[in-house]
Amino acid sequence: MDLSVLVLEQAEDPISPLKRLPFGMRGLSAPTIEAFYRRGMLDDITAPQPAKDDPGNRSAPASAHWMQQARRPAGHFAGIQFYQDNVDTAKWQYRLPSPAGTSMVIEMEHLEAVLAARATAMGVEIRRGFSVEELEQSGEIVSVRAGGETFEGRWLVGCDGGRSTVRKAAGFEFVGTDPEFTGYSVEVEMADPDKLQLGRHYTRTGMYTYSRPGTIAMVEFDGGAFHRTQPITLEHVQAVLHRISDANVTITALQLATTWTDRAHQATEYRNGRVLLAGDAAHVHSPLGGQGLNLGLGDAMNLGWKLAATIRGDAADGLLDTYASERHPVGAQVLDWSRAQVALMRPNRSSRALEAIIRDLIETRDGATYFAERVSGVSLRQDLGGSHPLVGRSAPDFELADGTKLGERLRRGQGLLLDFGPGSPLQALANGWSERMTYVAGTAKDRLGLSALLVRPDGVVAWASDTAPDLEDAAQAASRWFGEAKPVAESA
C-alpha cells in the first residue's frame, strides 16, 4: 500500500552558506550511519565530493585543528578530546564488521540533497516556501494553513525546528533550562591571525576554537543575551573575541556569522492526537558534541515505520505510542549530556577543577571507551522490556551464509526473523507475518552465540535467544511489533 506524503518546507532555497563548510560540517554517529546503510543510501551519502581546490568543496577542511594532531581524535566532551588509540572496541560485543562505521563527517548541504532525492524518488511531494501558520485537528483529519493555502491529511509530523509553530499551535508543553551563554560561529579575515592560538582553549571568560585561515567558534557566558536579538556586526564580533581570547587581534572583514545558545528544552509528550513532533521541534540543546542532527534522524527512523503501519491498518495496538516511550528518554539523555558539557565550560574555578578530573579520566582506556560509546551511539539501548541484553540495541551486521549481510536485508523496510537453528519451527511461526517480515534461515559467519533473533524495520532487535527458541516468546514479540498474524492459509 503506497502512502501519500507531503512535505511543507519553509525555506524556498535549500542552498545556504551555513550548510556548507566550514559551518555546515556535521558528524554522523553509528545509529545514523547504520540507518542510511540499511536503507541503501550509504553509497550516496559517502559519494566523493568536489576536490579541495573547488570552491564548492565539501570535504573536511585540512586546516581544522583536529586534523593537525599526531593522534587520531575519536571525539570530544566539552572540548576535551579523546583518541581512537585509547578506545577498547573489544568491549562492544554486539558489533560486527560492517560498511557502517561508528563516525563520519559530512556537509549538511550534501546530506540534505541526498535525503531530498530519496524522498522524491519514493513519491514524496516537497513544496518549498511554505511556512505553517496554523493548524486544526478534527476527527481523523488535520488541517494546516501554510503559505496562504490549506492542506489536509490524516497525520501531521512537526519537524519545523526549535521555534516550532506546529508544537505551539498543537499545545505541546516545552520545558527545560534557559541558556547560560551565547555561542558564535564566524568566518573572518584578520590583520594579525598569528596572534590567536590555534585549537580549542578555555579562558577566564569563556572558550574559543580557532582554525586557519579564519574560522572561529566562541562561547561567552552572558545568559544567551545576544542570540537573535541584534545584528551581528564586525565590531561586536571583534569585542567578543577580545574579551574571550585576551588576544589583541584585529578583524578586517566579517564574511559569515551566526549565533547559538545552550538552551535545553524538550516536549513533555511527542504526540497530541494526530500531531507528532520530531527533531528540534521535540527537543533543543546546544550543538556541543554534534548530537542534534543524529537525534533528529533517530526520531525519523523510529517513527517512520510505526506511522506507516498505523496508516496501513496493520499496526499492533499501541505501536505508535512506543515512538515517544522509546525516543523521549533518548532525547532527555542527550539534553543532559549537553548540560554536563556546559557545566565544564563555565569560567570559574569549580569548573576548571572538574575539567582537570575529566581530562585525567578521559585519557584512561576505560574513560576513552566510555566517552566513545556515548558520543558514537554504540551504547544506545532503548527499553523494549526484553530480558536478553541485545534487545533494544542495534542489530549486529551478520554476514549470512549466502554472502549477504543483515543490513542489506533490511532495505525493503520490513522486519527480519533470523533463524540460525536447522530444523527450527520458527518458519511456521513467521508465515503469519510474511507480509511484514522476512524469514531468513541458515547460519552466519559469526553468530555471536545466538540461535535466533527478530529485528524491527528500524534495525533494532525486538527479540533474541541464545538457546532453542521459545515459540511463545517469539510469537509474543512478533505480535507486539508487527500486529496480529494472518492465518497461514491467507498469507501463503
Image: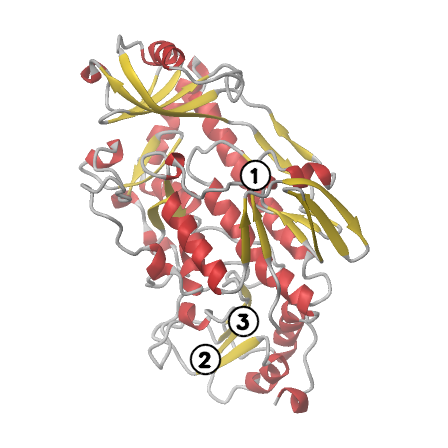
Q: Identify which residue is drawn at 49% across, 33% down.
A: 338
**Horizontal and vertical percent position of residue 198:** 24, 23
Label whose residue precedes the other's in the sequence (1 or 2): 1
Q: SS at mark 2?
A: loop
Name the amino acid, label 1: Gly
Sort mark 1 into few (<14), some (14-19) or many (20+) by Cα contacts within 10 Å. Answer: some
Q: Is residue 172 visible?
A: no
Sort mark 2 into few (<14), some (14-19) or many (20+) by Cα contacts within 10 Å. Answer: many
Q: Is residue 83 visible?
A: yes
Residue topped by disc 3: 414
Image position of 68 (left or right of 490): left
Q: Identify which residue is drawn at 42% across, 39% down.
A: 290
Name the amino acid, label 2: Phe
Indicate the quadrant where residue 371 lies: top left
Image position of 235 (left or right of 181): left
Q: Identify which residue is drawn at 60% across, 45% down.
A: 329
Residue lying furthest right: 139
**Horizontal and vertical percent position of residue 475:** 64, 76
Residue topped by disc 2: 420
Give the Cα separation between the discs numbered 2 and 3.
19 Å
Q: Nearer the viewer, residue 159 or 69?
A: 159
Q: Nearer the viewer, residue 22 or 69?
A: 22
Image position of 214 (left or right of 417): left
Q: Nearer the viewer, residue 77 or 4?
A: 4
- Position of 399 relative to 290 (above/below): below
Q: Identify which residue is drawn at 23% across, 37% down.
A: 67
Label whose residue precedes the other's in the sequence (2 or 3): 3
Marker disc for residue 161: 1
